[in-house]
Image (cartoon, rainbow, N blue to C red):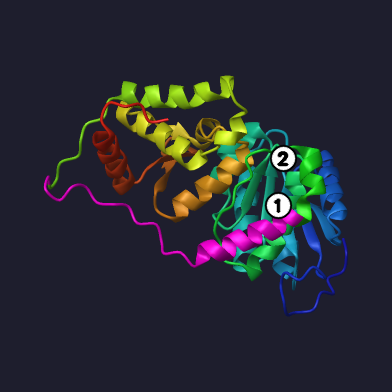
Amino acid sequence: MDAITEPFGDSCSKDHPVLIAASSEGASVRARRTVEAAGFRIGATLHLGVAGERIERQAAASAIWIELDGDQSAEMESALNSICELAARRRFPTIVSSTANLLDSVFASVGAEADLIVNADDGERAAALALARARPMIPDAISDVAADRTTERLRQLSDEVGRIAATLARLSSNPPVNIAPPDASRPGVVPDVSAERVRAVIRARRLRSRFFPEHLFADPAWDMMLDLLQAEIAQLRVPVSSLCIAAAVPATTALRWLKTLVQEGLFVRRADPHDGRRVFVELAPNTSEALRCYFSEIGDPAVI
């Protein structure tokens, strides 16, 4: 294990190391490759179960990179939760790289401050690390990349990070999201919307991909809202993994949007009372009312 010689001060300077916590040797190799390719120094590569002690003693770090694969045990979930809480308290940027099969359990264990990427390609992994490093210098908001092609992302990484930083700074000057209240002339009345009508809109939106490249119409926030409204009407619960599929964009992109929609109060996270390793997502009451009023206002024409 490396000696800890990092000075106090800026806790996320690129001069400081990246600490890696991994669930297996293979995961360690992948994480080291990403960090080294991004030009960061690696302070230590540790098993997930013992990484918390090192982070507790670390004076400063550019980021904490957590790499997960294989089956996630209860012990590993507890360790992940502890590491994320500790990193947030120390104000270390944290990236959690997961496989798709672990998404629901990992999402339940990762705090809102950490960035979660799923089955990410090399370009997306490098971008996640660069953005985590930049976040302390720019306000927190969201930016979206609909198409994730490895070669393009690698060639355009520097431009991509600059564009996202500018977008975040611009969005930070906008007021918080406000949802229009229901019609004041009909106090207490929330229009009924049929599940079939919402499903028809969703089918129409998905049909576009038969004729045009799907990324041209990426609108994950709206697609997730429609999916949650449909589930609410049918009295179904929606896990995070299903909602990411409904967003019709890469899982990491969907998770960025989901994180922001929860932060803005449009969506609500609900722990599964029967399984602490899973989290459901549902519409906030005001969001549900606004969507139902919207469908009432637009009438019969299909909204695509």
* Label 1 or label 2, whichever comes before in sequence order: 2
User: Does residue 176 appear anywhere in the picture?
Assistant: yes
In the rendered structure, the answer to whether residue 137 lies left or right of residue 36 reads left
The answer to whether marks 1 and 2 mark residues whose Cβ atoms lie closer than 8 Å is yes
User: What mark, if any, has residue 154 been given in the picture?
Assistant: none
Residue 170 is one of the magenta-drawn residues: yes
Viewport quadrant of the C terminus: top left
Q: Residue at x 55, y 64 (%)?
A: 170
Q: Residue at x 27, y 37 (%)?
A: 292
Residue 265 appears at what percent x and percent y? 39, 53
Q: Residues within 10 Å of mark 1 (few under 14, many from 20)?
A: many
Q: Which residues are magenta?
A: 159-186
Q: Amino acid at mark 1?
A: Ala
Viewport quadrant of the N terminus: bottom right
Identify the residue under disc 1.
128
In the rendered structure, the answer to whether residue 128 lies left or right of residue 25 reads left
Q: Secondary structure at mark 1?
A: helix
The residue nearer to you, when weighing 41 against 212, is: 212
In the rendered structure, the answer to whether residue 271 lies left or right of residue 64 reads left
Residue 97 appears at what percent x and percent y? 70, 45
Q: Residue at x 12, y 45 (%)?
A: 186
Q: Residue at x 42, y 32 (%)?
A: 227
Identify the residue under disc 2.
120
